[in-house]
Image (cartoon, grey):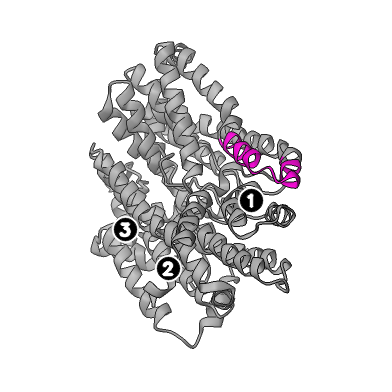
Amino acid sequence: MINQALKVNDAEDKKMLKKVFWRTMTLSSTYNYERMQALGYVYTMIPVIKRYYKDEDQRIEAYKRHYELFNTTPTMGGFITGLSTSMEKEASKDEEFDKTSINAVKLSLMGPFAGIGDSLFQGSLRIIALGIGIALAAQGSILGAVIHLLLYNVVAHLLRYYGVFAGYNMGSTFLKSASENGLLGKITKGAGIVGLMTVGAMTCSMVSFSIPAVAKIQGSELVVQDMLDQIFPNLLPLLLTFACYKLLKKNVKPIWIMLGMMVVGVLGKVIGIF
Amino acid sequence: MGVLMALIITLVVWVITWAEAWFAYPMINTPLVLCPIVGLLLGDFQAGIIAGATLQMVFLGVMQIGGTLPADASLGAVIGVAFSITLGQDVETALTFAVPIAALGSTFTLLKYIINGLVNPYVEKLVEKGDTKGIERVHFLVSFVPDLPKMAILFVALAWGTGFAQGMLDAIPAVVQSGLDYATGLMPAVGFALLLRMMWSKQMAVFFFFGVILVCFFNVPIVGVACVGLILAIILEANDKGTAVAAVASDNGEEDLFND
């Protein structure tokens, strides 16, 4: 089934889809607040429009159609540009084809695909790849950066490349039903599970927050950290992370929290509790 | 640092910045990758690698979702690591400069988006004429030219900023240095909190704590935790056909952690 979904027999179509793949990657290069990725989208569709429309007026109409607001994760964008390609192909053959549906479908899918992209790539894959990379690099090995890049890009690239072909073959009915019947939601949620577990794990292994200070109570020494560890290991890193979460919810900018931490670190050293 | 070396580093960073967006974010524009490259150019590869690990950890949560403007981790990392190597200092020095510079750096991203938008009326004319060569040319030029202000600042900072940086370091007392070192351990919490803000919901919270417990009590490495997560995701999502619609509905129900 997967083979069928990715197979394109026509050599010319295949060549064109490869161009669409290369161009889809550039979607965000010229992002702006007014039309977002519109320039990238029309740039991506140029080979498609040139191939399917012979009449110059029809071409210009198609360019205008794709120079409209669009925004999604470029890694997942291939599904949508591939789909637009197949819809433009239909539209060029069928006079009756409702061309406004091409943009309607684009707009309805950009949100769900950006959602998958964020949870799959930003939330889980990126974090896992960086986590492994950081651990190796901290020991002074360049393999850290290399493995991070490989791990992330092998997976991401499969979607960047085959997404275009899948979008082209599956057609609007499939992708729309996938978005409506919850398949995309399932993937997003599944990625969320992996992501949250990894973030939980890394909060414990990467945030280092301990209090080495020794309290002297009636002559007996009390090591604060030992006590905390007995309650729950890594209690302080977890509480710190939740405190940051709370601040972020109050719209405090992350960089201010970081600068605040620098101040806290210095103050702690001055007082002598860290 | 010589002017020529500053120019080389600036150009390398410019190409990487461009390629990051042009090739659908391959994650090359990250401290983990940039710092070793800068280290290699400045003749201390090892220091670059170590600084890359530390700065990446600090900036872990820095990422772009939609049109948000995160701190410019790469600009901060490049300047920070370049200063620390040329001044013969350690990772804390890199961090001391990286964080404030990253904070200022996001202004340049904003500036780039605004400059990008300036070409819209011109592109509109090209589209109406059907001038595809023109569209392609503008798309390519706009993908890197609006980064010029940022790259100019980077060049100036690298070429003439070292003396200023040395002066600042001399003025910083030792206790401050060690305090900043301590803060390096705290800062990844911000990154994780940023990720939680994106992913947290009441239904999903249990998975966060599952990951916590696997590490705290069983010492499972990250890859192991990810594998357990993948299997759980498959069991819970792929094998579960009945509640597909409910799964989507629950995604919208992001709730506050503390219900305030």
Using residue B214 as the reference point, say whether residue A183 is left or right of it.
Answer: right
Say if residue A267 shows up in the picture: no
Q: Quadrant of residue B4?
A: top left
Q: Quadrant of residue A61?
A: bottom right
Q: Chain of mark 2?
A: A
In the picture of the structure, the residue carrying the numbered disc 1 is: A42
Residue type, mark 2 in image:
Asn
Looking at the magenta stretch, what is its main secondary structure? helix
Residue found 52% across the figure and 17% down from its top:
B156
Residue type, mark 3 in image:
Pro
Helix, strand or loop status at disc 3: loop
CA gap, disc 3 and disc 1: 54 Å
* Residue reaching furthest to the bottom: B242
Helix, strand or loop status at disc 2: loop
In the picture of the structure, the residue carrying the numbered disc 3 is: A233
**Residue A124, percent across and down?**
41, 59
How many residues crowd mark 2 within 10 Å: few (<14), some (14–19), many (20+)?
A: few
User: Which of A271 and A151 lies nearest the eye of the viewer?
Assistant: A151
Magenta region includes residue A42: no
Closer to the chain start, of discs 3 and 1, is 1
Helix, strand or loop status at disc 1: helix
Residue found 42% across the figure and 33% down from its top:
A271
CA gap, disc 3 and disc 2: 58 Å
- Point out the stretch of residues depicted in magenta: B123-143
Q: Are marks 2 and 1 in contact (CB under 8 Å)?
A: no
Residue type, mark 1 in image:
Val
In the picture of the structure, the residue carrying the numbered disc 2 is: A9
Q: Chain of mark 3?
A: A
Closer to the chain start, of discs 3 and 2, is 2
